[in-house]
Each structure stands twice: as structure tokens, then as C-alpha cells.
Amino acid sequence: MENNNGTTIILMNSGMDYAIAAFNIAIGAAAMGKETNIFFTFWGTKAIQKGTYTGSSFFGRMMGFMNRGGINRIGPSHFNFWGLGRWMFKQMMKNHRITPMEQLLKTAIDMGVKLYPCQMSMTVMEIKREDLIDGVQEPCGVAAMLEMSDHSKQTLFI
Amino acid sequence: MTEELKAVATLDLKGLVCPIPIVKISQAIKQVQIGEVIEATATDPGVLADIPAWCKTSGNELVKMERVDKTFHFIVRRLK
């Protein structure tokens, strides 16, 4: 990242709509030849989880049971209605031939977008490295994220 | 089309929506030599703004862009 022309996206929210925005922007930036990173923090990590039950403590397991994540399991931030909204949105996306979620994730990885999980969020929510999908980078912290941001022209917080 | 503008690759981007058209074009441009041109046809109206922006940012030349009915036809030359 020597040309300082990259794009860094911080994905904070778990909503499907937020994830679509983050991946679309990342894919676009990668297509424009920029070195692109997405830093997944807090609820954002749900987008790169495999969908396995997580947690080791009582609260951690409870959290993992209520929301085990996975790119296809995250719902829209509005009108989710316990999953009905997610289904409806996916139908609408299909009807309008919008790229499906798992395809966005795959395209981002194929285009060389680097996906960084936030170590602190993983610790708090008791998410282990093996609960995350293949193709993500090693978990890192705020200093690593700020270094990416230093080498980027744009840093977006979603 | 003049001899100089002979496209070495033709992309069919019909039915694809943002951000896939620019993904395809950025992949296709890597397959051709510098100075060669590729042509593409898309249906997403978003390409009207996105392709010129992509060309500008990635340092390639938008040779031509035209609307034919409901499709958008454009020609891009690889500059670097």
C-alpha cells in the first residue's frame, strides 16, 4: 500500500443493507484499482461468520444462539420482522437481478478486497477464528485499522 | 468503426447491475494490451455515470458512449 490511494471501510452494523453498501463500495474501489480493506467491528463481524453457534460463557452462548451470523442470515436493519423482511428483500433483489449477498462476498474476496475481523469484538462476543469464513485476514485491532486508513484516500464508517 | 478502433474484446453486461459492470470491465481491461480497445453493452442506467468515473479513476480512456434504445454502448481504451 505504497501509493496511499486505498479505500478503508469500517463496517460496524450487522444489517444486510449496511453489508450490501460496504461490499458494493469495496468491490467498486477494487475495480478502480484501489487497495481496499474492510474492517469488521462489533455487529459487522456477523457478515463474515460461518453461521455456527458461538460463545463459551452463558451470555456468550445466549448471544450466539440469538444471532449466529452468516452472510445469508443477516437481516435488513428496517422491516426485518423476524426474518420475513429478509426473505422479502431477497425476493426483490432477485426480481431486480441485484447481486445476491454470498456473491457479493465472494466477488469482494476474488477482487482482492482484504477483510479484517476486529479482535476486540471477537473477544467480547466470544467469536473464535474458526467461526469466521475462509478468506478473511488475521484479526487485528485499532492500530492496524488506523494504519490502513493512513494509506487510504477514503475511510468510510458504515 | 475505423481500423484503429477495432475492439479486441466485446463484453455483454446486459442485465447486470452496480457494481458488477465495472468489475467485469476492470477484469477485461487487464486481458488486453495497452492501446487496445474493448466494447461493452449494458442495460443498467447507472453505467452512464459509473463508466466515465471508472475510466477517470483507473486512468483509461472512454472513447465513446452512446445510448441505443434501452441499452448503453461504450468503448474503452486501455491507457496503462
Image (tube, rainbow, N blue to C red):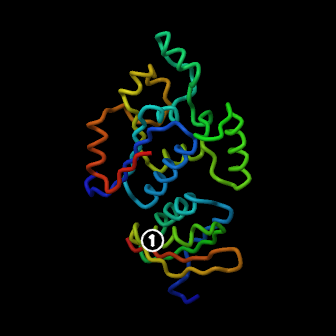
Quarter of the image where one finds residue A139: top left
Where is residue B8 drawn, in percent x and y?
55, 74
- Provide the secondary structure element on which disc 1 rests: helix
Residue at x 49%, y 33% (from the top left corner): A134
Quarter of the image where one finds residue A72: top right
Residue at x 63%, y 46% (from the top left corner): A100
The answer to whether residue B44 is left or right of residue A28 is: right
In the image, B74 versus A23, the foreground residue is: A23
The answer to whether residue B70 is left or right of residue B19 is: right
Residue at x 26%, y 49% (from the top left corner): A150
- Which chain does the numbered disc 1 sit on? B
Where is residue B36 drawn, in percent x and y?
47, 76
- For disc 1, the neighbor class at 10 Å (few under 14, some 14 to 19, many from 20) is many
| Residue indicated by mark 1 | B55
Where is residue B77 drawn, in percent x and y?
47, 76
Residue lying farthest to the top in this orientation: A58
Say which quadrant the N terminus of chain B sits in: bottom right
Which kind of residue does numbered mark 1 sit on? Answer: Cys
Report the label total. 1
Residue at x 52%, y 52% (from the top left corner): A24
Say which quadrant the C terminus of chain B sits in: bottom left
Where is residue A18 drawn, in percent x and y?
52, 44
